[in-house]
Image (spheres, rainbow, N blue to C red):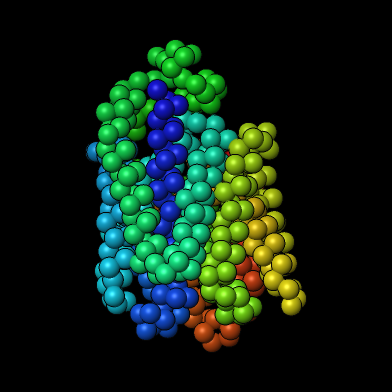
Amino acid sequence: MYSILLTIIYLAFISLGLPDSLVGAGWPVMHQDLGVPQSFAGILTMIIAIGTIFSSLASERLTRRFGAGAVTAVSVGLTATALFGFSFSGSFWMLCLWAIPYGLGAGAVDAALNNYVALHYAARHMNWLHSFWGVGASISPLIMSHALTSGMGWPGAYNVVAVIQIILTVALVLTLPLWRKVNTMTPRSHSRTEVEADPEDIKAPATEAAHVPLTQVLKIPGVMLVLAAFFAYCALENTSILWATTYLAGDRGVHPATAAAFASFFLLGITGGRFLAGFFADRIGDRNLIRGGFMMVGIGGLMLLLPLETNGVALAGLAIAGLGSAPIYPAIIHSTPANFGRHNSHAIIGIQMAAAYLGSTLMPPLFGVLSSWVGLWLFPLFVLLLAAMGMIFSERLNRLVDAK
């Protein structure tokens, strides 16, 4: 039963990843069709991120009241509705309007599902789970590239992804009784045939605890450090997703459709890296995954920075940066119960999601403003700076936890 539920969670994370890279992949064409500056992409992602911050902070209360299954189904349905709205939007202000349900649909489900897996499943499952997010996020630029070259235009890409989201919403609604049934059971009540995964894959269920107020959570030693590290990583990831295509097209002269396909290598690196990390995550440990990941992102950023005429090295740099990014997010989430206690994990993960989306809110538009003043060549330096920040804050957290 638990393994069946895990499969459903995997599908839910595909749905989370599908819309995340659409704006960045299509923006070189979208901003021209809508008659707005390219830096306006930051405004759109800011609205989306504000919605996710709000719903992430409300995630603990929503999940306690309605259950993870219902929160997931409603959230995916909201996202599907927003994507259809995007496809019919003929002006920038309409995109901004539909960005509101888009953002609200992402935050609560993200925190609820991440906390569930962090508490109940081994590190390998957390990496594979986020690999499925990468599957969705990697497919989207390819859908956008096909839509642009086939004559469908960018609205066609949003329609395709919206249909996929609706199908996933229906599947989630049909499985709501399963979520409720599993919530009433413990791993010891399952037979070997009912749980396909090894018993070690499923951690002991967390005891029911009272709601932890935000002010209390922020006073826990180390919480601000993990929030800063998560802020830096998610700012890095989302800035790359949003601006990699524009950087390749605007600074390196790559055709927009080709640049959209090239940018998918960053997401393919994340997807493939998380799949591979799942096989050795339990042996290497969360700390080493985070440390090695930030170092590899730095190598990829340096490859992007090299002033070479060929685009091959830059393309390889995007892929390497994606591989380095792969284990960072799931490792930070998975280490939360160990670093701060199981009874605090849901509240802290909810705030981590908020910090993640705050990074997504502030840093991509900041890069848009800076690039309009300085130039798109700043992109690799921006990535390197964020990677260095993430490494510093995560290492400080490690020393604090060890000192306890």
Determine the residue positioned at 53% across, 26% down.
Answer: 201
Residue 92 seen in the current view: yes
Q: In which quarter of the image is the C terminus?
A: top right
Q: Position of residue 180 (x, y in %)?
A: 28, 28
Q: Which residue ends up furthest to the left in the rendered image?
A: 65
Determine the residue positioned at 40% across, 22% down.
Answer: 1
Determine the residue positioned at 52% across, 23% down.
Answer: 197
Position above or below: 133 against 125: below
Q: Is residue 210 left or right of residue 270?
A: left
In which quarter of the view is residue 42 placed? bottom left
Q: Which residue ends up furthest to the bottom in the rendered image?
A: 373
Number of numbered labels in the structure image: 0
Determine the residue positioned at 68% across, 44% down.
Answer: 288
Residue 58 seen in the current view: no
Q: Position of residue 236 (x, y in %)?
A: 56, 63
Position above or below: 276 against 177: below
Q: Position of residue 257 (x, y in %)?
A: 53, 70
Residue closer to the observer: 3 or 260:
260
Position above or below: 53 against 255: above
Residue closer to the observer: 195 or 62:
195
Q: In this view, does 386 lie to the left or right of 78?
A: right
Residue closer to the observer: 241 or 329:
241
In which quarter of the view is residue 89 placed? bottom left
